[in-house]
């Protein structure tokens, strides 16, 4: 990868009467003859003028399943789904075609996987960590079952569980 020396940096640039800012997403003009692609999608990382007077912008790329190693499974993936990559490169400003907005969705869409249950035996710091991690990732977590190894634990488990939770003895 060639390193380009910057002369000036900018916060915004105007291309075809549209103003682009840092971190904007845009359609990027596709290669001629590419079927099924309106254009590629990129994120503007930086805007600058090089020492040779070229106006450039480093981009970070979004890829479709067909453009990745999972292309053999592309038929299982929604054709509107894009994958954000760490790949970056410099491009001329006139490659920007149209500004757009991309919604970043969490891995598990709400309601897609439903509620998950966790046994009551996962308690203490470990259980709390599991619950916090799963909840932070959008998982609806319930703990409907409490497991004990005998009657001597029954009183303890009754105080630790909620009224709506069942109780089973091993």
Image: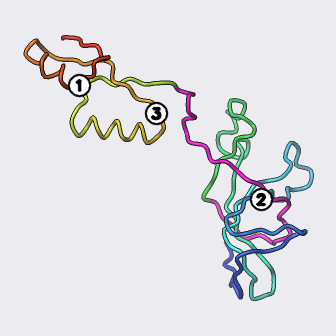
Q: Residue at x 56, y 28 (%)?
A: 111
Q: Looking at the image, is mark 1 or mark 3 earlier in the sequence?
A: 1
> Where in the figure is residue 97, as x and y percent of width and height?
86, 61
Tag of residue 64: none
Whether residue 109 appears in magenta in the rendering, the answer is: yes
| Secondary-structure class at tag 1 | loop
The residue tagged 2 is 26
Q: Residue at x 81, y 71 (%)?
A: 93
Q: Earlier in the sequence, mark 3 or mark 2?
A: 2
Q: Position of residue 121 (x, y in %)?
A: 23, 25
Image coordinates for residue 169, horizontal then vertical, percent = 19, 11
Q: Which mark is residue 121?
A: 1
The earlier-in-sequence mark between 1 and 2 is 2
Q: Magenta part of the protein: which range?
A: 87-113
Give the image quarter of residue 70. top right
- Residue bearing the label numbered 3: 139
* Quadrant of the image occupied by residue 167: top left
Query: On the rendered structure, is 61 left or right of 17?
Result: left
């Amino acid at each position: 990868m060639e390193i380009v020396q910057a002369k000036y940096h900018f916060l915004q640039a105007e291309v075809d009467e549209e103003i682009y800012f840092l971190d904007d997403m845009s359609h990027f003009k596709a290669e001629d003859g590419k079927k099924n692609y309106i254009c590629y999608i990129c994120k503007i990382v930086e805007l600058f003028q090089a020492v040779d007077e070229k106006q450039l912008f480093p981009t970070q790329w979004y890829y479709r399943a067909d453009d990745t190693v999972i292309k053999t499974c592309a038929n299982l993936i929604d054709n509107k789904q894009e994958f954000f990559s760490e790949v970056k490169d410099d491009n001329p400003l006139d490659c920007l075609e149209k500004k757009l907005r991309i919604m970043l969705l969490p891995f598990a869409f709400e309601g897609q996987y439903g509620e998950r249950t966790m046994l009551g035996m996962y308690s203490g710091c470990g259980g709390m960590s599991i619950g916090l991690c799963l909840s932070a990732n959008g998982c609806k977590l319930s703990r409907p079952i409490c497991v004990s190894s005998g009657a001597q634990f029954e009183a303890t488990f009754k105080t630790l569980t909620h009224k709506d939770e069942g109780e089973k003895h091993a």
